[in-house]
Amino acid sequence: MSKPYVLGVDIGGTNTVFGIVDARGHVIASDSIKTRKHANFDDYVAELHDGVERLLNANDAEDKIQGIGMGAPNGNYYTGEILNPPNLPWGPVIPLAEKVSKAFGGIPVAITNDANAAALGEMTYGAARGMKDFIMITLGTGVGSGIVVNGQLVYGHDGFAGELGHVIVKRNNGRVCGCGRTGCLEAYCSATGVARTAREFLEIRTEPSALRDLQIEDITSKDVYDAAVAGDKLAKEIFEYTGTILGQAMADMVAFSSPQAIILFGGLAKSGELLMRPLKEAFDKSLLPIFKERMPKIILSELKESDAAVLGASALGWEAKYHYEAPGGAIAPVED
Amino acid sequence: MSKPYVLGVDIGGTNTVFGIVDARGHVIASDSIKTRKHANFDDYVAELHDGVERLLNANDAEDKIQGIGMGAPNGNYYTGEILNPPNLPWGPVIPLAEKVSKAFGGIPVAITNDANAAALGEMTYGAARGMKDFIMITLGTGVGSGIVVNGQLVYGHDGFAGELGHVIVKRNNGRVCGCGRTGCLEAYCSATGVARTAREFLEIRTEPSALRDLQIEDITSKDVYDAAVAGDKLAKEIFEYTGTILGQAMADMVAFSSPQAIILFGGLAKSGELLMRPLKEAFDKSLLPIFKERMPKIILSELKESDAAVLGASALGWEAKYHYEAPGGAIAPVED
């Protein structure tokens, strides 16, 4: 018989958040540990295990976990490994699913990257319930994406599909991106991208702006947002610039999979009309006419931001049985 | 019991080609009619029916057709209709599947656009047999695409997914495209795109070229190819330019669905190293590093060009029973 809960684990560059989640998407309880405390990955898994055990004990949930779903940067659904993680102290290859399943006595574990987990969370518990075709864009420090086609997450032949933060939006003289190339969407439309735009605009232009009162190297997307809300013209133009690039890029995404909706998630997505007006204008203008017959919706995530990472990861826990099993302690991908 | 043959029908702007195909992908016999002869769509269907009947009679195949698969520009898999066909004399909405199924006494009919049909043909009979994730790019008068994810063709929420000929490759000062926008891949990397590049290069530059002996408005991609093969430096640069743009665009496609292979089809794809060398160089250089672990292959279609359109359309005929049925003459989409 299936058990009533899953465990969702989100491995971020700073914190690892984990929570017990029920089938309706309620986070029963959650806690966190510091991701970077242990240079040795086994020590990290041991601390994660201790923390989870405490949480399970406190909530009378010890034998009630159906599966563990985990979201991690560069987490690979097929192999259960994290490959060349950009912000984690271990690597280059981390056998995450195997180690965690072993530590938890063989509970099935499935992993994917954080943006894919967000898409699964939205489909299972959020704004994409009932949708078979949608794209999730996460606007955080970077830009991530999870793509759902025909009701299934798109993993691609190697498990790494859905890197829409790294489509090229400026072919010539584009900004250097963290991936080592230039001109990526992420270099413009992430929180750090907005801060970079602010620095560029302040250097190139001469008009007054409240942003000039700040140390230019310390400006954040939050500073730009606050200034724009207060009416600062330059700050508004920074959002105009960001939204336009994102809306144009999103029109190209529609040419690929013709989704019913594109769902935005993350701090920057909550900038309201400052971002959404130029974004929607550019999207409408850039969309191939045939897609206007049944216009894709642009909507915001319905998941509470504090719960979303855990919820998204947990959604994968329900199907974890199909992918990792541990008969006699051996962990192996299983065909479904 | 299932029947041994399907009928494949490819509706092109000039000719409608149809053929009887067996389960191994052999075209038993084929014929064609002129697409634009009849201003009235019913008359066109009647002539198609007559032509097919003659072919079936001559090949003792009258009661042996399992289903009819049809490829047509803007053909919609979900609705069975052609919507706003760019090069056909009927419209704006053509109820293709319904009319054809009725004309053929209720044989199930499934339709899609021509590039999707090509992808299905490649998956059923060609270079993509056994692949679950690949992208088909057709380089003809225009640029079309068919995307397969998880072994299924990507139709999107409205049936119009896979318009990769209309992703934007030049954001600023791009060429006007037939779709009414500017900067589309199709405006650069189709046969007509190559001819446009030739005209641009000849106007902007001053160096000698065999292409200058031709009437500039009449230059075709074939002329450019012939000149390049003969060693003409400017003609070679035109292919360099075309291949580079296509390779860069293909790297962005990988960021979406991480396919095992991208398969090229159509006249321009047969330009050999003239196109493939710059294309592969640009692709390798532009690809996000994580995808280089299991590098997507760039390969040519294995289908004979004369058969490919019919074969591709026919592949859809095998599954047509799942989508259109005609109990009592009524045609309705059926859930599978």
Image: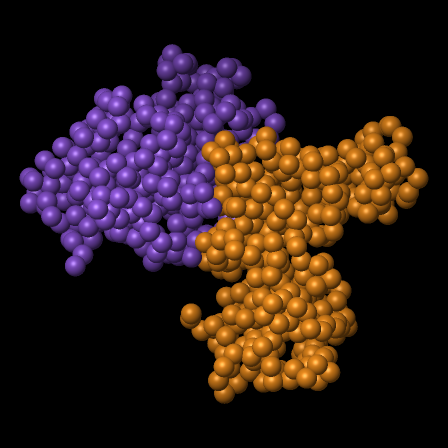
Chain colours: A orange, B purple
Total numbered circles:
0
Q: Nearer the viewer, residue A335 or B79?
A: B79
Image location of residue B29, percent across then percent down: 14, 40
Q: Residue furthest right?
A: A213
Which quadrant of the structure image shows residue A314?
Answer: bottom right
Q: Residue at x 60, y 35 (%)?
A: A283
Q: Nearer the viewer, residue B44 or A49?
A: B44
- Left/right placement of residue A146 relative to residue B278 reads right
- Left/right placement of residue B195 relative to residue B89 reads right
Image location of residue B325, percent across then percent down: 26, 48
Q: Residue at x 51, y 70 (%)?
A: A319
- Left/right placement of residue B233 relative to residue A29 reads left
Q: Is residue A90 above or below residue A50?
A: above
Q: Residue furthest bottom?
A: A328
Q: Is residue A321 above or below residue A276?
A: below
Q: Nearer the viewer, residue A181 or A295?
A: A295
Q: Residue at x 36, y 54 (%)?
A: B335
Image location of residue B80, percent across then percent down: 34, 40
Q: Nearer the viewer, residue A318 or B234?
A: A318
The answer to whether any part of residue B273 appears in the image is no
The answer to whether any part of residue B239 appears in the image is yes
Image location of residue B215, percent across then percent down: 38, 12
Question: Which quadrant would the C terminus of chain A be assigned to in this image?
Answer: bottom left
Which quadrant of the structure image shows residue B217?
Answer: top left
- Left/right placement of residue A273 relative to residue B259 reads right
Q: Residue at x 83, y 40 (%)?
A: A229
